[in-house]
Amino acid sequence: MSDHNGVTVVGPSVERGEEVLTAQALAFVADLQRRFGPRRVEVLAARAGRRDEIARSGRLDFLPQTADVRAGDWRVAEAPADLRDRRVEITGPTERKMTINALNSGARVWLADHEDANAPTWYNMVAGQVNLIDAIERRIDYTGPEGKHYRLTVERTPAIVFRPRGWHLVERHVLVDGEQVSASLFDFGLYFFHNARRLLDKGSGPYFYLPKMEGHAEARLWNDVFTHAEQALGIPHGTIRATVLIETITAAFEMEEILYELREHASGLNAGRWDYLFSVIKNFRDAGRDFVLPDRNSVTMTAPFMRAYTELLVQTCHKRGAFAIGGMAAFIPSRRDPEVNARALAKVGEDKRREAGDGFDGSWVAHPDLVPVCAEVFDDVLGERPNQVDRQRPEVSVTAADLLDVAATPGEITEQGLRSDVNVGLRYIESWLRGVGAAGIQNLMEDVATAEIARSQVWQWIRNGVRLSNGEPVTVELVRRILDEELAGISDELGSAAFETGRFKDAREVFEEVALAEDFVDFLTLPAYERID
Ligand SMILES: CC(=O)SCCNC(=O)CCNC(=O)[C@H](O)C(C)(C)COP(=O)(O)OP(=O)(O)OC[C@H]1O[C@@H](n2cnc3c(N)ncnc32)[C@H](O)[C@@H]1OP(=O)(O)O
Ligand SMILES: O=CC(=O)O
Ligand SMILES: [Mg+2]
């Protein structure tokens, strides 16, 4: 434990942690917390207020008070040179081996993730910052436990776009004046303090993905944080570039306003489909059967409400000179199973073709073996151009009713779907509690966002009196029985020794809290964070 000028670090020491947790860097974070921490609390309270309003009215609409922003003539800042071509973006945790693999992947951008793909153990958060500095300095290497050596093998590495944790989270290992620091300000502050100048000196810049925002007031808060941070380090205003994930249903109604708030710092919007689905379930969880989604794996991007969302996103971005970046197809390739691999490549190719055809400027992949698939699709559509931001979509006309047309989603609610939600929820939470924030489960990529869908869908089915396709009602008792059965199956598969040393008991407790409790828990990571480390 260390204590300096009102900043107390209560996390254990991490190898090379002293390089990032310097007195100056912590003072910078503390200043951000003191200036902006109270506004973060207000923003979170406003979220709760808005959700109460949705519960009362059962609907959402574009904001009348910002009609002039939507009608106005404005554009976001010009893209810096290394963010003009974003056709392939690889995402992943900042763990050392994966950092090197992502840098060698051939993607144009690496989304270095402290959000959905991250389990925020103190070790991960500090070591991740060390790895990021080493990555920017191109001095990163690593030897795995089996002796395999990793180093940078390419001349041109992807531009790094760092995703800090969302506004809802705290970093409990750092206290500022006795209060837990905002995880967003901690992650952003350390990365910016250590790397802003470094990146500029290397011809790049401090670039960020901003997760899980629920509206333009939150974008204004980020913009004010950026402006202050630039001033504090004497870096020109507008150096930071931010890409905002539109991954909540409320933010979908404020895309223009979000870009407007951040216009001097904005690079684009990303269609974060998994959290978006979670947000639809969460916000309309008690709005009746019209908002009940079928089995998680049957909801695709061609469902009418998902198409409305991505079409509006592309149209909005290009109207404002911003990049539209596509989302994550969940299929992961396999180097062991050619059939699984072929299916993943085909599915991902199909997904990227739809996005490129719709006008997206680039898209995400979860695995290095998917970089060529995404590159090929966007190469075909872009040709010599670095992006297609000039492609306007005047024919697109999306209404509030289109964004909320969940009822038109095809698909069934099946016992297999329920079992899959329970199985994936348990396995993912167990992995997260062990410090692993992204996992391949049943050949699909699972992370915080996909696990949120699984557990919130179970909650919604129970609370809306849903029956499975076999006629059985979804009840707390049924889900408890399935939990027993799925856990027994996992134990048989892993063997009892491995099962007992895992975190399945805690994972079950968390799953029950976030899927079965009468009061809906806003984020599964909140109760899970109490049990991490
Ligand atoms: C909803 C959202 O926010 S999506 C964005 C957040 N989610 C993510 O970023 C998920 C990123 N992807 C991953 O973490 C991984 O691909 C997983 C967990 C899904 C699968 O990983 P693995 O089980 O290790 O896959 P696999 O064994 O095929 O990996 C092969 C190699 O590729 C590497 N690799 C796989 N995915 C990545 C990645 N995203 N970045 C860097 N390297 C990767 C592995 O480290 C492994 O390296 P090695 O051969 O040197 O040991
Ligand atoms: O962050 C991306 C998502 O789909 O969620
Ligand atoms: Mg997300």
Image (tube, helix red, strand yellow):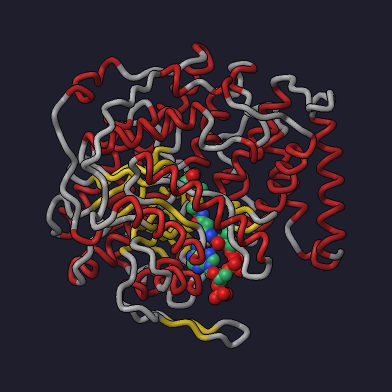
Q: In terms of depth relative to the viewer, which is nearer, 426 or 414?
A: 414
Q: In which quarter of the image is ligand 1?
A: bottom right
> Looking at the image, which is closer to me, 496 or 267?
267
Q: Can residue 118 be seen in this view?
A: no
Task: Say if 358 sits above or below 473 in the image.
Answer: below
What number of labels is visible? 0
> x, y percentage for residue 246?
40, 38
Quarter holding the C terminus? bottom right
Whether residue 51 is visible here, answered yes or no, is yes
Report whether 271 appears left or right of 193.
Answer: right
Residue ID at (22%, 64%)? 204
Q: Which residue is drawn at 60% across and 35% down?
A: 299
Could you say where residue 144 lies in the image, as x and y percent from the top left?
Answer: 57, 82
Q: Which residue sits furthest bottom?
A: 147
Q: Residue 272, image x and y in percent?
A: 45, 42
Give me the residue at 74% from left, 19% from top: 465
Q: Residue furthest top?
A: 57
Residue 186 versus residue 214: which sits nearer the camera?
Answer: 214
Placement of 34 over or under 296, stated as above or below: below
Question: On screen, 184 above or below 309?
Answer: below
> For residue 7, what is the image quadrant?
bottom left
**Along the horizontal axis of the image, is 443 left or right of 91?**
right
Left or right of 162, for residue 489: right
Residue 496 lies, in percent from the top left, at 86, 64
